[in-house]
Amino acid sequence: MFPELNNLLNTTPDRAEQGKLTLLCDANTDGSFLVHHFLSFYLKANCKVCFVALIQSFSHYNIVGQKLGVSLTVARECGQLVFLEGLKSSVDVFFRAQAEPHPLQFLREANAENLQPLYEFVREALKPVDDGDAAWRCPVLLVDDLSVLLSLGMGAVAVLDFIHYCRATVCWERKGNIVALVHDSGDTEEEENNILLNGLSHQSHLILRAEGLATGFCRDVHGQLRILWRTPSQPTTQRDRSLTYQYKIQDKSVSFFAKGMSPAVL
Amino acid sequence: MPPHAQPRVPQPSNGKSRRQDSVPKPKQRPDTFRKPVSTADTGSHHHQRPPRLTVRICLRKSGEQVHILGCEVSEEEFRAGFDSSINSRLVYYDFFRDPLNWAQTGEALPGGPLGALQAMCERTDPGPVTVALDSLSWLLLRLPCAALCQALCAMSRQHACRGGGPAAEQLCVLGLLHRELHGPGPMGALSSLAQTEVTLSGTAGQASAHILCRRPRQRPTLETLWFSVLPDLSLDLQGGPPLESQPHPDPHTPQVDPASHLTFNLHLSKREREAKDSLTLPFQFSSEKQQALLRPGPGPATSRIFYEPDVFDDLDPEDPDGDLDV
């Protein structure tokens, strides 16, 4: 996790909020550093994490996680992390008997209407353990990313339904959190992606939007991060607060600074 | 406050309110309820306004029984912020927990979203009632537009039949729409059903509501209200648009004359100006020239050339074209 981002979000692993949906969005840049931040953040917060990783392999996230101070291998072995490696298990779909349910079953079906098998997988993975002491703090679902589900043939409404059910189960029933990444191509013709992005924006409590600089590539400023707090359930003055910072990604951390205040130009 | 409004207006809901006459007029469309279509956002990705909040705001003002079809948030989240007097008047239909019946527990409302709408209508008492749909966008994404419009029409018709009574406008339906999620077709269809449209933009601190009201046999009225949402969900109406958004020209800046500090003179004196104005340009076909051409003067018809040869000129008196037999 990046301590500077924690400061901007005014949160620490000990004081993580519960029952929230955080939407990560990137436009003209790669926002995956936010995924790595939240993965390491919630593992350090002692939460049970279900990571639906459809983009990269386990070893990729593990290597980055080690730079950030968490070991995904250890977390998986002790049961804190349930990792769905999309790249590997998508092949398993085709070599299994058809009757067995698989979270990525929609890849096999010609007219998959919904993502219910994937939701069932998440629900099972984050089922509360029946011990007397709760081993983990709260369940967290992390998805990297949702736009690829559109590319794989699912409709925007199906993905919205999946997140809806995850919200009902993870956020409302089990008081956990959801963090999901959606790409914003900026293309108004991509209707499905825009419906997904706008629909999720209305349901999110916190939106982090990483954008490339309008002026193009810069060696010292990699992009701009917009943070929008939406907390619809709390009618406080903090609602609809928006902040913008620029950032530079380094090897093991990300530094944030106000617009125009990059150390390189001061 | 708009003069046409019901007591609960202003209705800064991101939703649509529908009013319906209890007795349908035969010459008009049978379903005279209309739904205002409201747009939640102006297309920006920073959805800075909680539309649910505005639905709750107008419910707070209502004195009637209020039924809510909750699809987007849980019941706890919806009821949070209301005091017990309002919460006791809210009848909540939970369509959030298991809307598509994936859990197969048997607790879900049967018939899907359309069945839920019908169930709501059947359970409402006769008399004035408000039905709030949170949200209409959720329903519109999952139902065909025509089916949804028909269901909305049927709701008002059923309520009118059950209500009887000459009291007009018994059923008020509020629907919340997020404009950026739908195309112009469905938006237009729902807009045509609506009697009042409230379009919201801005943030909770500085929001504006454009209210378009269409009443039968009256001219449509358009009004704009500026307001902010207070922490207790009440509204603070403001007189005009927020000052920061209007670019004011500075009245104290003197007008600068660009020709004042030059090293050459660009100004004309009065005499020079008169001479300039009275000058006839040589190639301008003025009326004087026209008259001079029409009436040939007493002088020679051809013009005369006066030429003084200098020492270098070689004048040959012979006509160079003399050998031509012309």
Image: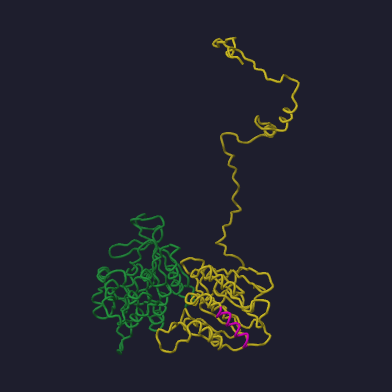
Dominant secondary structure, magenta: helix
Q: Is residue B45 magenta?
A: no
In this rendering, the answer to whether B44 lies above or below A111 is above
In this rendering, the answer to whether B119 lies above or below B240 is below
Name the residue: 74% across, 30% down: B291
Residue A200 image point, x, y percent? 43, 72
Q: Which quadrant of the view contains residue B218?
A: bottom right
Residue range in magenta is B150-162
Residue A169 image point, x, y percent? 39, 82
Name the residue: 25% across, 73% down: A71
In this rendering, the answer to whether B262 lies above or below B158 is above
In this rendering, the answer to whether B285 lies above or below A20 is above
In this view, the residue in front, B165 or A11, is: B165
Name the colour assigned to chain A in the rendering. Answer: green
Q: Which chain did the renderer colour yellow?
A: B
Q: Is residue B160 magenta?
A: yes
Residue A34 image point, x, y percent? 35, 68
